[in-house]
Image: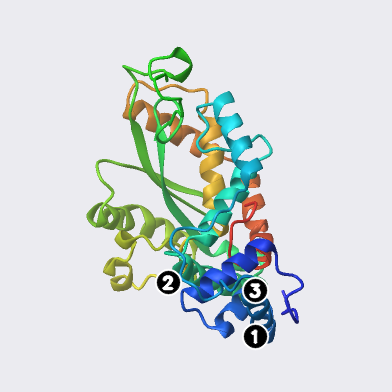
């Protein structure tokens, strides 16, 4: 995306993020690069902002509001209708915008997020013109957790004071069949790779064993010039890959939109959605069976989407995309 002159293309969220970024010490040059406008455009906007309310350089406490009174009423109404929503939101998906706005405006994390977003955009630009042959050389990897029963994560219920035991605000429990199964998986342009069950805590020692016995054999079978992709989790910064002279792809932090294996986990989740397991062994058997049946057409679709993913990240300036 080419740089625009002035600030006519800035959204309201961009403008609020620029104000907070400036308050946190980001230079005008840095902000100009992050939001794709000129330094003069940033300067002019901040001067107008200061003239309007004098708040550009003031250090206000707390997070700026991202909802008005109408939004608050709608959030309250929706929560009363469905107390099990993961956060106050409506059926139009406005909570997604609300959450993104809140993240952008969080004064304590703006500088770090902006830095990460900048690196993500840089990575996307560097790989925008890669061909399918280039993407075929990457061995994509990740870990994922699959529950034996129900949905993932903690379920919250919002309820009025004094209504704790009302049936409307009770969640069903499972006495048998709870728990989860953690797996590590990988795939490349040649097809589905290994799926390995992780027993216990996934620490650096467990990860080293996976690299030795799962990743390396598959990477070598992929052919010369193959590159291993992993995220920036601390346990992944292992000296093992360096000692084995493994080519590791540079990867920006907080960039799940760029990793196609995230959609592969979703595909595996759909395939196992109607299958209940009594224990972890049975669950892993189900996962492995469905994993090995994922067709090559799915892999083709994921890798063919990489250019669109990169462009989407560039267009979104490192923020969340549809991927």
Q: Where residue 49 is drawn, which disc sits there? A: 3
Other residues around mark 2 within 10 Å, as few (<14) / some (14–19) / many (≥20): some
The x, y position of residue 159, in whole percent, is: 45, 25
Which residue is at 45% across, 25% downward?
Answer: 160
Q: Which residue is mark 1?
A: 39
Identify whether 32 is placed above or below 316. Answer: below
Which residue is at 33% across, 29% downward?
Answer: 179
Q: Nearer the viewer, mark 1 or mark 3?
A: 3
Identify whether 183 is placed above or below 312. Answer: above
Which residue is at 51% across, 70% downward?
Answer: 114
The x, y position of residue 214, in whole percent, is: 35, 52
Label 2 SS: loop
Comes first in the chain, label 2 or label 3: 3
Which of the two residues, 201 or 171, is positioned nearer the viewer here?
171
Q: Which residue is mark 2?
A: 247
Which residue is at 28% across, 72% downward?
Answer: 243
Comes first in the chain, label 1 or label 3: 1
Comes first in the chain, label 2 or label 1: 1
């Amino acid at each position: 995306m080419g740089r625009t002159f002035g600030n006519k293309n800035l959204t309201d969220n961009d403008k609020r993020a620029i104000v907070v970024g400036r308050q946190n010490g980001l230079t005008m040059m840095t902000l100009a690069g992050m939001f794709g406008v000129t330094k003069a455009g940033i300067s002019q906007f901040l001067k107008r902002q200061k003239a309007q309310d004098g708040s550009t350089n003031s250090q206000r406490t707390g997070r700026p509001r991202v909802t008005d009174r109408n939004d608050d009423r709608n959030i309250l109404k929706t929560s009363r209708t469905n107390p099990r929503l993961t956060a106050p939101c409506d059926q139009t998906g406005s909570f997604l915008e609300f959450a993104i706005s809140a993240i952008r405006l969080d004064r304590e994390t703006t500088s770090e997020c902006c830095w990460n977003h900048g690196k993500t955009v840089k990575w996307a630009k560097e790989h925008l013109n890669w061909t399918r042959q280039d993407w075929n050389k990457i061995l994509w990897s990740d870990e994922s957790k699959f529950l034996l029963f129900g949905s993932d994560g903690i379920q919250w219920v919002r309820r009025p004071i004094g209504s704790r035991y009302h049936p409307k605000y009770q969640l069903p429990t499972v006495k048998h069949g709870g728990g989860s199964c953690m797996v590590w998986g990988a795939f490349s342009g040649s097809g589905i790779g290994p799926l390995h069950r992780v027993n216990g805590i996934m620490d650096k020692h467990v990860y080293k064993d996976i690299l030795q016995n799962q990743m390396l054999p598959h990477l070598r079978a992929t052919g010369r010039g193959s590159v291993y992709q992993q995220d920036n989790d601390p346990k992944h910064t292992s000296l093992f890959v360096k000692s084995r002279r493994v080519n590791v792809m540079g990867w920006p932090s907080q960039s799940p939109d760029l990793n196609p294996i995230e959609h592969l986990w979703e595909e595996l989740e759909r395939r196992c959605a109607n299958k209940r397991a009594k224990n972890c062994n049975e669950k892993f058997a189900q996962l492995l069976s469905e994993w090995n049946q994922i067709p090559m057409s799915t892999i083709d679709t994921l890798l063919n989407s990489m250019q669109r993913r990169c462009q989407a990240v560039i267009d979104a300036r490192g923020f969340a995309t549809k991927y």
